[in-house]
Image: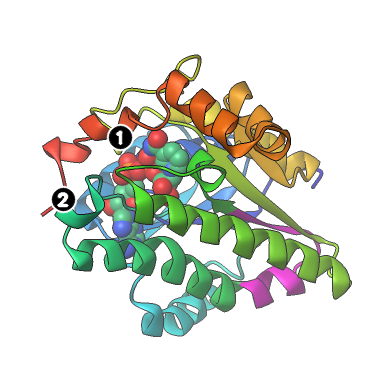
Amino acid sequence: MKSLRDKLILITGGARGIGLAIARRLGRDGGQIVLTDLDTAELERAQETLQQDGVRCSVFTLDVTETDAMPDFRQRLHDTVGPVEILVNNAGVVFGGPFLDVPLEKHLFTYRVNVDGLVAMTHTFLPDLISAGESHLVNISSASALVGLPWGSTYASSKWAVLGFTESIRQEMTELDHKHVGVTTVCPGYIDTGMFEGVRPPLMMPFLSPEELAENVQKAILKRHELVLEPWLVKLTPFLKGVLPRFLSDGLADLMGATTGMRSWTGHEGGQRD
Ligand SMILES: NC(=O)c1ccc[n+]([C@@H]2O[C@H](COP(=O)([O-])OP(=O)(O)OC[C@H]3O[C@@H](n4cnc5c(N)ncnc54)[C@H](O)[C@@H]3O)[C@@H](O)[C@H]2O)c1
């Protein structure tokens, strides 16, 4: 994509954190932002700060688990701001803890937000991307899509699903000759938003800022990168997992603290487990 100027960009879960940073980054490049979230009060605060930064932004309360509401929401956008050209599926939740200590409903809810919500948004808005001259789908997965994550098993597996889904859609767009639809999976390590408060990050993988990640997402859209793997060590993970025998890759992950970091997870406001 040559430029983001005047592109209509829809972001889910954009009231704070990574979604808000992406909105600010893409909005500063001239994109017209449609920011959605289930938290209406936070959404309005986000709109205010974005507008103070000179970003064109409208906001809509949208819970990505309410999939039945999506066709009407799409129609509402068509009637007000127009068809979406860039979709950023960012909304996500995590409930850390030993698998059996986390109530089953929390595990299943993780899939409803992180997987079902993202698939439903893509199903609803992909026709807009296909009809546009030049468009892009960005799905936020995680570095945990490349490894196992003890104390975060359903979160990690939801992100494995996002990676597999997005890779498949990317190839499907090429097969169907919709090459004008760029597709990117974003797999970041820990980002300093509060979602992973309390976690001890692995060695040589410090928390990144949401702004640093947003910069990479902006580049990926403009240069049609298929994968964003950040920080640098995440780029090595698929290779290392591919060439090392399992006991060595497990040992390395252990040594770096990647398998134990989630033990101290508290998340936003000291924990969302119950
Ligand atoms: N923070 C990290 O370390 C990290 C690392 C890798 C991937 N990610 C992913 O990045 C994305 C954003 O994470 P973040 O750190 O900004 O989290 P965050 O908790 O700061 O923000 C998430 C936003 O999503 C919204 N949201 C939650 N459930 C929703 C729903 N059902 N419908 C609509 N909105 C909903 C929340 O209200 C919140 O505003 C998530 O998908 C997360 O899994 C985060």
Residue at point 32% right, 67% down?
A: 63
Specify whether residue 222 is painted magenta.
Answer: no
Indicate the position of residue 222 as horizontal and vertical percent values: 75, 41
* Residue 204 in view (yes/no): yes
Q: Residues within 10 Å of mark 2 (few under 14, many from 20)?
A: some
Q: What's the residue type where badge 1 is placed?
A: Met
Horizontal side of residue 143 vs 227, given as left or right: left
**Front residue (pair 226, 137):** 226
Q: Nearer the viewer, residue 217 or 100?
A: 100
Disc 1 versus disc 2: nearer the observer = 1
Magenta residue span: 126-138
Q: Position of residue 205 (x, y in %)?
A: 49, 20
Amino acid type at mark 2 = Arg
Query: Does 107 sit above or below residue 208?
Result: below
Residue 153 sits above or below residue 114 on the image: above
Determine whether the residue tagged by mark 2 lies in a helix, strand or loop. loop
Compute the Cα span from label 1 to label 2: 13 Å
Q: Residue furthest top?
A: 204
Mark 1 residue crowding within 10 angstroms, few (<14) / some (14–19) / many (20+): many
Residue 232 placement (x, y as % from top left): 63, 22
- Residue for point 62% across, 60% down: 164
**At which x and y percent is residue 170?**
74, 62
The residue where tag 1 is placed is 262
User: Looking at the image, which residue is at 53% across and 61% down?
Assistant: 161
Query: Residue 131 magenta-drawn?
Result: yes
Count numbered badges in the picture.
2
Q: Which mark is residue 123?
A: none
Q: Is mark 2 within 8 Å of ligand 1?
A: no
Instruction: State the quadrant of the C terminus.
Output: bottom left
The answer to whether the residue labelled 1 contacts the one labelled 2, judged by CB atoms less than 8 Å apart, is: no
Q: Which residue is mark 2?
A: 273
Up-down relation of residue 231 to residue 270 (above or below): above
